[in-house]
Amino acid sequence: MTQILLFDPLLPWPILAGLAGLVALSLGLAIWKRLSGWPLRALGALLVLGALMGPVRQTEERAPLNDIVLLVHDDSASQHLSDRRAQTQLALDQMRAQLAARPHTELRELRVQDGTGVGGTEMMTTLAQALANEPRGRVAGIIALSDGQVHDVDAAPDLPAPFHLLRTGRHGDWDRRLVVQKAPSFAIIGEPVTLTLRIEDQGEVPAHSGHAPLDIAIDGEPPQRFSLPIGIDFDLPLTLPHGGRNVIQFSVPTAANELTDRNNTALVQINGVRDRLRVLLVSGEPHPGGRTWRNLLKSDSAVDLVHFTILRPPEKQDGVPVDELSLIAFPTRELFLEKIHDFDLIIFDRYKRRGILPAIYLDNVANYVRTGGAVLVAAGPDFASADSIYRSPLAQILPAAPTARVIEDAYRPAITDLGARHPVTADLDDADIWGRWLRQIELDRPTGDIVMTGQDNRPLLILNRVEDGRVALLGSDHAWLWSRGYEGGGPQLELLRRLAHWMMKEPELEEDVLSAEANGQTMRILRRALRGDVGDVTVTLPDGSTAIVPLRETGAGRWEGQYSGPEIGLYRLQERDKTAVIGLGPAAPREFEETIATAEVLRPVIKSVNGGSLALEESIPTLRNVKPGRPAAGRGWIGLTPRGAYETLSITRAPLLPTWLLLSLICGCIVLGWMREGR
């Protein structure tokens, strides 16, 4: 029970002040004139003023409330290094015991884990959320068990009580880490790209030579070793081996007594793109389809097109030598012998043998395909003639032979079952509404993948691989009808674009491939195959263990699966003879950027509330009570501020004096004063 004196004035305070001034003036005048009854009259006036002020005695029934202590347990990844978990657990047990023995105290435990993405240790965010749910007037202190590496100090809330850091770690800890300072997301295939790397040593570093070995591996291949200076930015030129995603792993061998090797490895994923796609287009004669090819290739700013058309056939007998049929001498030797490997794709559009390209040039084209080049033949009636380019060294690589028959009947191109699975023709518009073509070259003995058919299911588009290269044969020269909208047209530009890019080995158009896409720590596994079913994917984790991921069919020739990796690093995928690699997690995990325990990060927060930082390596501190505003930490101890909070159960108010007694006193003073003056 607690009693408090309150005032509930009957008149406003300014009026009471005026009356008090009038009383003081009257009292002064009475003393000056030496009136004998002035003390009694002064006492009566004071009693009147006191009555007007309305003194009230308030009685409260109070229930004391316990103090609250927040115990923050940092359980992020960096706290699992060395023996920090054991240090933390021992300190937790002793803090719980001390707080349990402290009277009128409640414990609130907070656990801080790794933030999402690259958030790191978000201790201040967790603390702010906890304080929002607690009455600040009851918080007596905050104790954090951590290595001090907190990544959201800027989000620190206004703390109502002392904040103490009980620091894990050892005095002799040291660590070496690899930092990728600069790495592009895209790079041009065949041209060097510069990455900036740095090897840093932290903590109590032992003596060393000033250099450290660095291993570099691309797509899980055997690594190459270099030697880099420590503590200096190093520019490393690198050339990507292929298009699409290149997973590059940099690693530094673990040194003796190093705190962790989790930051000795960095993953960088760079997409390889072609600077310019170089295409050679050879047109045997002017025709509407030639403009279609030219418009398609010229519409892409990334394509360098070399195009020559034979405007005047050599058989025209006008006495002009063959080598003088062009206005400018065309560099056939330079293109087909010396610089043929500079081209990504060669297209023969209705071309037939006319003596302009000797057999040795066409034989070089066949060798170009075997070594990784690509040739596309758009066949017209010339392909079925005696001068067909099939009757040349190109027959070694072409996927079908002409029968010498040209079909002049209208037909509607159709996608085969195999074509519905092939990325070149899959998911095109509805073939039932395509416009018809009016000519087809009959093909015999097809080899490779028939993805489109024409008249009476005869092969129309055949794709094939020849050693390291690719060949496509389109058995018609009427694809241009679609671009003119004949009978509604069709997806001519998309079909020809896909066809050209498949031949130039664009990764997204590979028909038999295993790949994966990363989203944080989850990978989406993609498998595309033309024939048959696929099996489960074996995922090899960074630590060498394996996991089996089943795939489900999501479309014709396409399968998908998902897998969440438990740790950051390079994962290897295998399904039968298909392999792939993918990196999960950031290039440099934030939790392992700084691993040496320190109080410097949290020092501004500690200093603002007179808290302290103590190393658990030395001792576990005891708890003391301190007054608000006083230093709350010392050697071997930390302080908590008792709050003295309470809950009011009931309130009772009563006048300080009974009314009858007060009136009696006032009247008595006045009467006695009058009687005294009357004498």
Image (cartoon, rainbow, N blue to C red):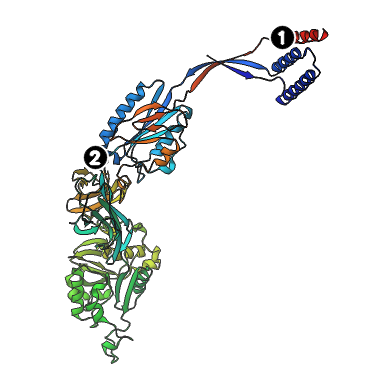
The residue where tag 2 is placed is: 82
Residue 619 lies left or right of residue 367; in this view the side is: right
Q: CA distance from mark 1 to mark 2?
A: 82 Å
Q: Is residue 333 above or below residue 196?
A: below
Q: Element under label 1? A: helix
* Residue plotted at (76% across, 19% down): 27
Q: Is any part of residue 425 visible from this angle?
A: no
**Residue 169 % position (x, y):** 28, 39
Q: Is residue 63 above or below residue 596?
A: above
- For marks 1 and 2, the one nearer the N-term is 2
Q: Nearer the viewer, residue 654 or 488?
A: 654
**Residue 5 % position (x, y):** 61, 17
Q: Element under label 2? A: loop
Q: Which mark is residue 665?
A: 1
Residue furthest to the bottom in view is 319
Q: Which numbered mark, 1 or 2, is in the foreground of this view?
A: 1
Q: Residues within 10 Å of mark 1 (few under 14, many from 20)?
A: some
Q: Nearer the viewer, residue 411 or 316?
A: 316
Residue 658 lies left or right of residue 281; in this view the side is: right
**Residue 422 % position (x, y):** 26, 57
Quarter location, residue 399: bottom left
- Under mark 2, the amino acid is Ser
